[in-house]
Image (cartoon, rainbow, N blue to C red):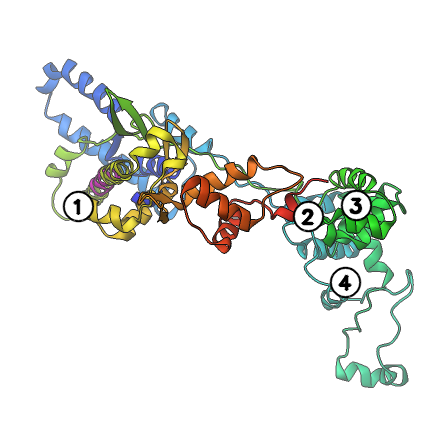
Amino acid sequence: MQILQMPLLDLEARVEQELTENPFLERESEQEQASKSGTANEAQQEVPQTKAESELDQLRENFERLEKEYGDGRSEQRPVADDGEKRFDAIQNVAGEPASLHEVLIGQVGLLETSDRRRKILEYIVWSLDHHGYLSSTHAELIAEINAQLSRPLETSLGQPSPPETETETESGTEAEGEDETVPTADPSQDEFLISLAQLRAATHPALAAKDLRECLLLQLDSHGEHEGLLREIIDKHLGDVEGNRLPRIAKAAETTIEEVKLALEDLRHLDPAPGAIYGGTTADVIVPEVMVQEENGEWVVHVDRERQPRLTLSRAYEQTLKDLPKGDPAREWIRKRRENAQWFLEALRQRKSTLRRIAETIFEHQRAFLEKGVESLVPLRMQDVADTVEVHISTISRGVAGKYAETPHGIFALKFFFAGGTTKDTGEETSQKAIQQRLRALIEKEDPKKPHSDEQLAKLFSEEEGVTLARRTITKYRKAIGIPSSTQRREY
């Protein structure tokens, strides 16, 4: 089941790992070359009786080498043999995990010329950022946490220590030591923290460690020297109106025109709402379609990509040696286990391919209209329907389509895309939710941007033009699902 659930790229990495660790597995092409080589040497089968002994010696050498490398791990790294270069190259060429926001910023903090104490403060601030680059705690909370980590509390005035905590400490130092009252009261105005924060922003991004979007945008204006103006007023007082596209309200409050507001919003779009996004990040997912649907002689045919799927076979190199080894020999047991693992892996690959093909064939048998006309012709399809046809449990279908993609005449789609609920038209024809969403998008694209349709109007249009009766709240749900804003937000002034 684990092999079935793997996307193709993960499967390729797993195959390379198995080829490296298990000598009983080899690529089919390698076996064919070995077969040709064996035919050329048939005349040498009547070799002196030392051949079996040399095979056994070679087997023992391989056994000792593999046990050292994959056993206790204490052996030195061996040079890659010529016949193994492709396997190791494939593993070594896999992209590593990208550095995270925190890792990149910690690296930059390490390059700053500052004291060890200041560096600790900067590192603590960095580790307190969320993935957008905002502070997840208030200044007061951070100062309290930092003070708990430092041997000397943060200073309220540079070069001078913090004032005593309590009257008891000022009157009797001995009594204060006995009570271990070392954590000072958090004070967000403490200079050392604020200067450290300013140093971090100067070295990275002017809005890093902002508490919210408003502060993030205002900090960027400060860095540009824009301390007044319409844009600053909009950010400071009207971000909610900007989100709701209530431009007339902004213009009235700012005593200006809608055109001036629109110009200011153009400048707003050049500011960075997520200062942490430029640091670190993730690699883009590589989509490799494993299933291909093509029209051949008027019929739709499903293929599982054979080029990308490795063709493996069970090596027979050690079979005769296994028979010759006496019972109880550790090499015999080692060979037996590796051979069983290889057989299991080959069977898992075969079952994965067979199951995926049957699932894909069943999906596209139901979705023939999609193959001919496109997304607007998708019909409702449940995983249970496919499971009943393929005669497997529904969990097998769920795992089988996870991370798998199909190349169709209308583009590349995840196999999960073809499973969706739906509704029935007034004509009795079934249509899927995705088809409804596609038609909803088309209706909105045709509307007048200065007088966009409300959800109530869209529901009426659906009934008149598409023959589908939908409630207003259903239109709202579908509109949000495909990321289309409300009519108020879509309106252009």
Residue 262 lies within the magenta run: no
* Residue ranking furthest to the left: 46
The alpha-carbon separation of the residues under discs 2 and 1 comes to 54 Å
Q: Secondary structure at mark 2?
A: helix
Q: Who is closer to the viewer here, 202 or 114?
A: 202
Residue occupied by mark 2: 106
**Residue 200 visible, this orientation:** no
Determine which of the numbered discs, if any, sits on residue 125 in the image.
none
Return the disc, 1 or 4, that comes first in the chain's sequence.
4
Q: Which residues are magenta?
A: 343-352
Looking at the image, is mark 2 or mark 3 earlier in the sequence?
Answer: 2
- The quadrant in which residue 271 appears is top right
Identify the residue under disc 4: 139
Q: CA distance from mark 2 to mark 3?
A: 17 Å
What's the amino acid at mark 3?
Answer: Pro
Q: Amino acid at mark 1?
A: Asp
Per the image, the residue denoted by label 3 is 206
Disc 4 packing (10 Å; few <14; some 14–19; many ≥20): some
Mark positioned earlier in the residue sequence (2 or 4): 2
Measure the C-alpha gap from mark 2 to mark 4: 20 Å
Would you name the residue on which mark 1 appears? 329
Amino acid type of the residue tagged 4 in the rendering:
His
- Mark 1 closeness class: few <14, some 14–19, many ≥20 residues within 10 Å: few
> Marks 3/4: CA distance?
17 Å
For image coordinates 84% across by 59% down, the residue present is 192
Horizontal side of 192 relative to 120 (left or right) equals right
Mark 1 in CB contact with mark 4 (< 8 angstroms)? no
